Image: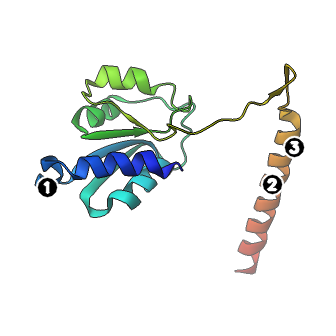
Amino acid sequence: MKKLPVSLALAALFATPLAMAKTVDVVASFTVLADIVKQVGGEHVKVKSLVGPNGDPHTFEPTPQDSQALAKADLVFVSGLGLEGWMDRLVSASGYRGQPVVASTGVTTRSMEEEGKNRYRSSRLEQHAERRYLRDQRDECAGQSRS
């Protein structure tokens, strides 16, 4: 479902004379989205991811180089749904003339509230994440010691 807006945008771009003339310069907000664009666009796209592989799109702070990349881009992809709170300011500041493609367009979200109460319990989630992290670290250390 999430690939549909990405596929449609790339298909529309490839149908233009611009696509026949050169490789399409694409900027994606983070690596997962950049990967999808690379898979769909193949050799016809050159993709730059703003947030690197170990970065957090929630806390990312754009640099002047990111602004320059957007200014030169033929197409910009974002996830949407509030993931990239910094993107609107960056698009404005960069002078990018297009409209970013929002990959989450058409996605139905779920509410975490039931009867006015938030069902999210951070302590339970944090405990699960902590156990998983410790288990992964244990397995990694065990694998290293066998080498």
Q: CA distance from mark 1 to mark 3?
A: 52 Å
Residue type, mark 3 in image: Gln
Labels 1, 3: front one:
1
Q: Nearer the viewer, residue 115 or 61?
A: 115
Q: Marks 1 and 2, Cα distance to the nearest angstrom? A: 48 Å
- Near-viewer residue (137 or 20): 20
Looking at the rendered structure, the kind of residue marked 1 is: Met
Instruction: Name the side, left or right, on which 5 lies relative to 58.
Output: left
Between discs 1 and 3, the one toward the N terminus? 1
Which mark, residue 132?
Answer: 2
Q: Calculate the distance from the C-alpha at mark 3 to the C-alpha at mark 2.
A: 9 Å
Residue 98: where, in percent of width, then height?
27, 30
| Whether residue 114 is situated above or below residue 134 in the rendered picture | above
Please tell me how crowded label 2 is: few (under 14), some (14-19), or many (20+) other residues with Cα within 10 Å: few
- Earlier in the chain: of badge 1 and badge 2, it is 1
Mark 1 falls on what kind of element? helix
Residue appearing at x 40%, y 20% in the figure = 89
Amino acid at dot 2: Arg
Q: How many marks?
A: 3
Mark 2: which secondary structure? helix
Q: Position of residue 4 (x, y in %)?
A: 45, 50
Could you say which quadrant of the image residue 135 lies in?
bottom right
Quarter assignment of residue 57? top right
- For label 3, the SS is helix
Q: Quadrant of the C terminus?
A: bottom right
Q: Which residue is mark 1?
A: 20
Left or right of 76 on screen, residue 81: right
Q: Which residue is mark 3?
A: 127
Q: Sequence-wise, which precedes: disc 3 or disc 2?
A: 3
Which residue shows up at 26% across the image and 28% down it?
96
> Can you give x and y, in whole percent of width and height, for residue 73 in the image?
25, 39
